[in-house]
Amino acid sequence: MSKLSALALKIKIAALQKQLEAAEKNKAPAIKKVMALMKKLGITIADLQGAGEGPTPGKGRRGRPAGSGKKTKGKGKPKLAGKKVAIKYRDDKGNTWTGRGKTPRWMADAEKAGKNREQFKV
């Protein structure tokens, strides 16, 4: 290796190290912003686990082949879309949940505190 190429590599390494240092300096404020936004939106680290895994190419959101979801009646919406669902769970603070979709934070917190989901059944 010639002295010129070794010097060029050292210069390149130094420049890359400066870029890395700058990126590391920007990391802490970025994390602080993300944490503040998560707190504002009520998102926890547990909510994020697995959230970055997008659908597999050629597959729909739930990993099934695209287009294999609920059948629609010509308008692009499932038959039951927009229908009201009865409330199945309620706590003493007035929070409610139909039992569908993701477990709401108030229910998850209560279960972590040792309460049984059946205690909130309406």
Image (cartoon, helix red, strand yellow):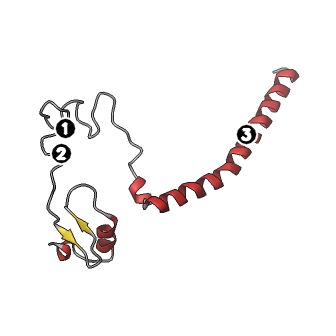
Q: Which residue is mark 1?
A: 77
Asked if the residues shown at circle 1 and circle 2 are in contact, with their CB atoms under 8 angstroms apart, the answer is: yes
Inter-mark Cα distance, 1 to 2 = 6 Å
Question: How many numbered markers are drawn?
Answer: 3
Check disc 2 and report the residue beneath it: 81
Q: Look at discs 1 and 3 and give the one toward the viewer.
A: 1
Of labels 3 and 2, earlier in sequence is 3
Which numbered disc, 1 or 3, marks the residue that appears first in the sequence?
3
Task: Check disc 2 and report its element: helix, strand or loop.
Answer: loop
**Residue type, label 3:** Gln
Camera-side residue: 24 or 94? 94
Q: Quadrant of the N terminus?
A: top right
Residue at (24, 55) in percent of width and height: 101
Q: CA distance from mark 1 to mark 3?
A: 49 Å
Q: Is residue 55 left or right of residue 86?
A: right
Q: Nearer the viewer, residue 21 or 11?
A: 21
- Residue behind mark 3: 19
Q: Is residue 16 above or below residue 27?
A: above
- What's the residue type where badge 1 is placed? Lys
Crowd rating for badge 3 (residues with CA inside 10 Å; few <14, some 14–19, many 20+): few
Task: List the single residue furthest toward the right.
Answer: 3
Q: Place residue 96 in its image quadrant.
A: bottom left
